[in-house]
Amino acid sequence: MRAMTTMTGKSLRILGSAVFMIAALLPAAGIEGSEPLPIPPILEFESLRGGTKLFYLEADEGQREFIPGKSTRTLGYNGDYLGPTIRVRRGDDVIVRVKNSLRNPTTVHWHGADVPADSDGGPHQGIAPGETWDADFRVRQQAATLWYHPHFVETTGEQVYKGLAGLLIIDDENSGGLGLPMDYGVDDVPVILQERKFDRNGRFTYRPSMSDQMHGYFGNEILVNGAISPHKDVPRGPVRLRILNGSNSTLLRITFDGLSEFHQVASDGGFLERPVTLTYLVLSPGERAEVIADFSRTTGSSVVMKAETNGQQIYDAVEFRPAGIRQSAWEPPESLVTVEDIPESEASKTRRFAMQSGMGARMTINGKVMDMDRIDERLRLGDTEIWEIVNRDGMGGGMMGGMMNQPHSFHVHAVQFRILDINGRPPPAQLAGWKDTVLLWPGDRVRIIARYDSYKGLYMYHCHLLEHEDNGMMGQFLIE
Ligand code: C2O
Ligand code: CU
Ligand code: CU
C-alpha cells in the first residue's frame, strides 16, 4: 500500500508539518550528473493566404533515455517526449493540423483556450490512427500560458503520462509592455513538472492499480521539461518561469531553496491584477502559474526549485545557476492588468456539482460517471452562471466519502472563470485572477463564476486528476 493513501490534503497545506519532515528523511531522488534544462522549441508555422497560421503536430511513439544508458518507451509530439511550444497572438487565426501516428485513437485539447467546440479536442474529436484532424480557431483571449494534451475517452491518463503534452502561449498587445522578462528560453523559461514512476531498469510504464485509480498514479522522480534534476543557467536578475503541473494526479508545492520569496504574475488564464509575493506555490495537475524569481537576490551559486508532493516526496526539480553581472533588485510593477469582476448579480443560475469517489475505482460528479451519450447540463449562450462545487471525499458523509480524504480538482472547458469563494471566504490573491482549474481539498466548497458567451456546442467539465477523469469524474455541458 502506498503511503499516500494516508495523506490528507490538509497536510500539504500546513507548512513544515510532520508529513514534510518525514519526507525529508527519504533518500534523495536525484540522479548523479545534471543535464541542461531542455527548452521545448517554439513551433514554426506556415502563413496561409489571409494570414492564418498553420501549425503541424504529429503524435508518435518514441523512446528516450531519461537515465543515461536506460531507455524507455514514450509518446511525443514532433519528437520523443512532450511537444513544441505553440506561440500565438490575440487576433490570430490558427489551424493546428494534428496527425495521429499512434496505434490508438487520440485527441488534442487546448486546455484553457476559448475555442469552438468542434476544435476543442475533447473526447468527441477522436483522431483514428493514421488520420489527421484540424483544430481551427481565432485567438480571442488575453495573454496566458495554456497547454495542450490528449483527451480521448479513458486513455487521457496513459497518453499524457507517456509524454503527450505541450505549452500553448498566447501573447497580446499588453503583454509585451509590462516590463516582465520575455526572452524565451533565456529569462522567460517554461517549466513543465511531471512526476513519473521509474522502475530499476529506468523505464516508466503506466499500469495503475485499483488504488492508483482511486488516489492517482504517483511516482519516484520528477521530470522537468522531460529531464531529471536538470540545471539552468540564468541571468543574475529577474527570470520569469511559466510553471505547469503536468503530472497526472500529483499535487505539487513549489519553493525555492536560496530565494525566500518570489512573485506570481499570472494564473491559468492570464495576468493577475498585480504581482503577488509568495513563499510557496501549490499547483494541482493542469494548473499553471507564471512567477518571477529574482536571482539578483541570491548570493549563492545556485537556487534549487523544490517540488514537494502529496505523495510525501521532495524533489530537487531544477537547479538555477545565476551568472553574469548582478542586476538591481526587481521592483514588481504596481499593476499588470485590470481583471474585470463578473458581478454575482449577473448570474442567471447556480448549478451544483458534488465530486465523490464511488464504488470500486469509479469516480462521480453528482453521483454519475461520465457517459458520452448523456448531456449533463444545458446552458444558454451568453449566460453568466455560478457553479458551486463540493468535494465530498473527506466530509464524513456518503459510503466511501468519510474515509477517502481525497483531493479533487475541477476544470471547465470553454471558459476562464473567477473564484468567488472557497469555503465561504474570498480566494487568496494568487487565485483571484482568471482560472480554468481549481483544487478542492477534502470537504472544500468552491463557488466559481463565468460567462458562457463564446460558442455554442458541447464541452467538458471534470476532475483534472487524470486517473479520476479516466474513471468517470467528468460531465458534459451543452451551450445552446
Ligand atoms: Cu486539461 Cu479537459 O482538460
Ligand atoms: Cu481543458
Ligand atoms: Cu478527482
Image (cartoon, helix red, strand yellow):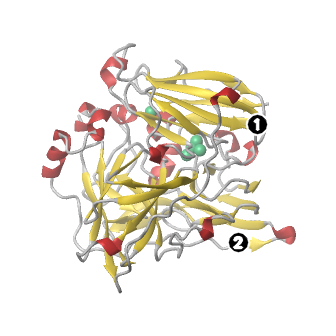
- Report the front residue among 441 and 26: 441
The amino acid on which the numbered mark 2 sits, given as a three-letter code, is Phe
Q: How many marks?
A: 2
> Left or right: where does residue 216 sit relative to residue 143?
left
Q: Which label belongs to residue 45? A: 2
Q: Evaluate whether residue 335 shows in this view.
A: yes
For disc 2, the neighbor class at 10 Å (few under 14, some 14 to 19, many from 20) is some
Location of ligand 2 given as a quarter of the image: top right
- Residue drawn 75% across the image and 39% down it: 453
Q: Which residue is mark 1?
A: 457
- Residue drawn 29% across the image and 74% down it: 34
Residue 450: horizontal and vertical position, in percent? 65, 36
| Element at label 1 | strand
Residue 105: horizontal and vertical position, in percent? 62, 47
- Residue drawn 69% across the image and 53% down it: 141
The amino acid on which the numbered mark 1 sits, given as a three-letter code, is Gly
Give the mark nearest the N terminus, 2 or 1. 2
Q: Which label belongs to residue 303? A: none
> Left or right: where does residue 194 sit relative to residue 219?
right
